[in-house]
Amino acid sequence: MLANLLDHDLEGLAAFCERLGEKRFRATQLFRWIHQKGASRFDDMSDLAKSLRDKLKTCACIQGLKVLREHRSADGTIKWLFDVGGGDAVEAVFIPEDDRGTLCVSSQAGCAVGCRFCSTGHQGFSRNLGTGEIVAQLWFAEHSLRRLLGRDDRVISNVVMMGMGEPLQNYAALLPALRTMLDDHAYGLSRRRLTVSTSGVVPMIERLGRDCPVALAVSLHAPDDLLRNHLVPLNRKYPLAELLPASVAYLDTAPRDFITFEYCMLDGVNDQNAHAQALVALVRAYGGGRIWCKFNLIPFNAFPAAGLSGSPKERIAAFARILTDAGFVATVRKTRGDDIDAACGQLAGDVRDRTGVADRIAQQRTIRLVPAAVAAAGFKEV
């Protein structure tokens, strides 16, 4: 079986070259051809000796992902559906802006966390992606966009691991993928412009801080454990009393001086003034008096299976005002690509649920806000 060179970061590729009896510097040449120039054929690598090219043909390949569908939004957003085999497909999304180009990348086929408001989780979980499958999304997007736009310089300046899956539950494949994205011989992304989003896998937050500190976004979505248990089931394993200290500790090595908390605005569920005030109290309790986080308020992008609706704009604005009046930065994410189901929380791809996650989510009851008399509970089941 041929080794797919997209599976290797630079160190892994150097080790591969050494096993072939080649000098380590050959790995740097290969790495540049693959990632900087988008080469997929060894014959195109003109500064490699022919003997090496012939050797590589017998034992290696550069194999990307097959594109099943491409959708383009009226706002310029592009979504690709990639075939990852076994009946599974994953999605990646490119979001162009005046000062940046952002690619949202998937790390799993489906997701086992099962957040109530996320379309991916409602589809269930099939498997982890390999390093090459994660990197291949960036490899394809970067070089296809260069051809489309007629550019030689880099198009994608930001990568967010916010596509399908929980990245920190696929850490072994994620880590070399991040290192490839950061490497100056590949994509040369800044650590500040490479973001890993997590629903709160506490031990792996700590490990990421040691191994490869990049920007961190935590999917919070609730100010207390009772509500978060229902919105983000992983909270039952790693409650806020563990997640918040781990987030604060991450700042010791993080490339930014703040952690981003993602907060999906759900009408009548987590969007009341009392929730905003509880959120302020929560992060103040762990911040030692400093402003150590920012909030990204996300308008909910509805899908039929969710049984939830998004907060009205005026409610989101009032919620944000409470946070900013308390001294925190609170931004409202601009919805992009919703006409092609490419907005936040809408990525579902096409996966075979091998764990029963989708069935468990479907059996959950809907939740709603209850009167102020029992607001401490945040909700009740109906």
Image (spheres, rainbow, N blue to C red):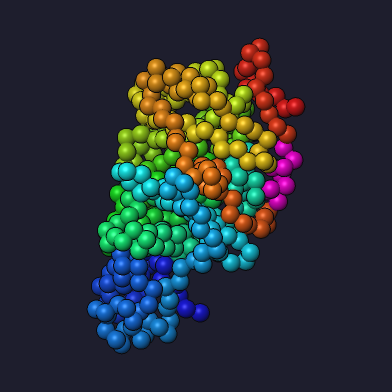
Q: Quadrant of residue 187?
A: bottom left
Q: Which residues are magenta?
A: 356-364
Residue 1 in percent (x, y) is at 51, 79
The residue at 31%/87% (across/down) is 51
Residue 112 in percent (x, y) is at 61, 49
Q: Is residue 212 left or right of residue 279?
A: left
The residue at 66%/15% (across/down) is 371
Asked if 41 appears above or below 314 in the picture, the reply is below
Residue 363 among those drawn in magenta: yes
Question: Can the viewer see residue 73?
Answer: yes
Question: Can the viewer see residue 160?
Answer: no
Asked if 153 appears above or below 367 in the picture, the reply is below
Q: Is residue 256 left or right of residue 91?
A: left
Residue 206 among those drawn in magenta: no
Q: Which of 261/94 is in front?
A: 94
Q: Is residue 70 left or right of residue 326?
A: right
The residue at 67%/41% (across/down) is 304
Residue 40 in percent (x, y) is at 39, 73
Q: Which of 41/186 is in front?
A: 41
